[in-house]
Image: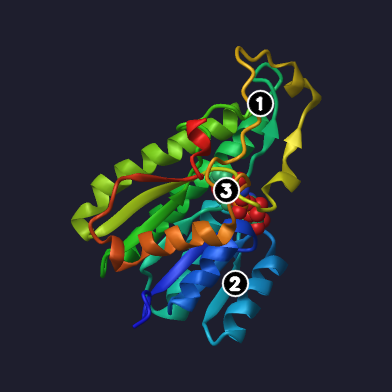
Amino acid sequence: RRRLEGKAAIVTGAGSGIGRAAAIRMAEEGAKVCLVDLKERNAEAVEHIITAAGGEAIVADTDVSDPARVEAAILSAVDAFGRLDVVFANAGINGTMAPIETLTPEQWSHTLSTNLSGTFYIVKYAIPHLKEDGGSIVVTSSINGNRKFKNFGGAAYSASKAAQVAFAKMAALELAQYRIRVNAICPGAIQTNIGENTQQTDEVQSIEIPIKYPKGSQPLAHRAGRPEQVADLVLFLACDESSHITGTEVYIDGAESLL
Ligand code: NAD
């Protein structure tokens, strides 16, 4: 029996990278998947991969920082699949990398509203549907903001990623009564497209760092991880194999954060 047979999942940031790999992996294990992304065409490409392999998927062209759109995406998933069991709150951006002194309030808000508020909205609007049968929520945080602080210029990013873990833990406590589990994952560098949309300001070079850290590769593999490796962790946390795991964060970084 496949590990998510008969289950329905919603994945944000499903058009690329970690979200794409996790959506495909969950569909392989029997889940019907609602693919949420700003970039509709990329999500449609993932839909084609899943349906060509005999799976079931729909696309919700949605900006996770817009609560009304997020609620509509949840409802479209429940309409299409008749249920909801798994939420992968994964959409995220690096945003603008700049010293705090030059980072604008708008740049700060853009990162926080995508990474942190986007997580709140998808979880909030999923709860009424997850409550019926219990379920699993997985939140993509990062080593940055939790174990590692070497992403200079990334104060907004790290703040959002640390807050996502705190949010996941509070949600785990609050939702345990409904048999809804909530866990965060903290990836190190993973080979995705996240760098493409990063706004790297020149001022970021001016940040005085107390210690020159070695430019770390990951001790385990001497390279960044692959999205498929993260997808296997997401699948584990989504399915019943992790039935007693909630309120925790799992590092998946080849020991990068220990350097
Ligand atoms: P990616 O850029 O390859 O994929 C992210 C997807 O999210 C894209 O398809 C993008 O269109 C979508 N997205 C961005 N903003 C959105 C919004 N407002 N609404 C809906 N969709 C939106 O990046 P990735 O590396 O796969 O990132 C996924 C998550 O992993 C992020 O939360 C990121 O912070 C986290 N992460 C990534 C790394 C890494 O090294 N790649 C490391 C640690 C954590």
Residue indicated by mark 2:
59
Question: Which quadrant of the view contains residue 204?
Answer: top right
User: What amino acid type should be assigned to the residue bearing mark 2?
Assistant: Val
Question: Is residue 183 toward the left or the right of residue 201 in the image?
Answer: left
State the SS at label 1: loop
Question: Is residue 200 toward the left or the right of residue 236 in the image?
Answer: right
User: What amino acid type should be assigned to the residue bearing mark 1?
Assistant: Gly
Compared to residue 51, the image places residue 106 above or below, namely above
x and y percentages locating residue 4 in the rendered image: 38, 75
Compared to residue 163, the image places residue 210 above or below, namely above
Which residue is located at x 23 percent, y 60 percent?
A: 179
Which residue is located at x 46 percent, y 31 percent?
A: 147
x and y percentages locating residue 144 in the rendered image: 53, 34
Which of the two labelled residues, at mark 1 and mark 2, occupies the earlier sequence position? 2
Q: Nearer the viewer, residue 125 or 222?
A: 222
User: What amino acid type should be assigned to the residue bearing mark 3?
Assistant: Ala
Which of the two labelled residues, at mark 1 and mark 3, occupies the earlier sequence position? 1
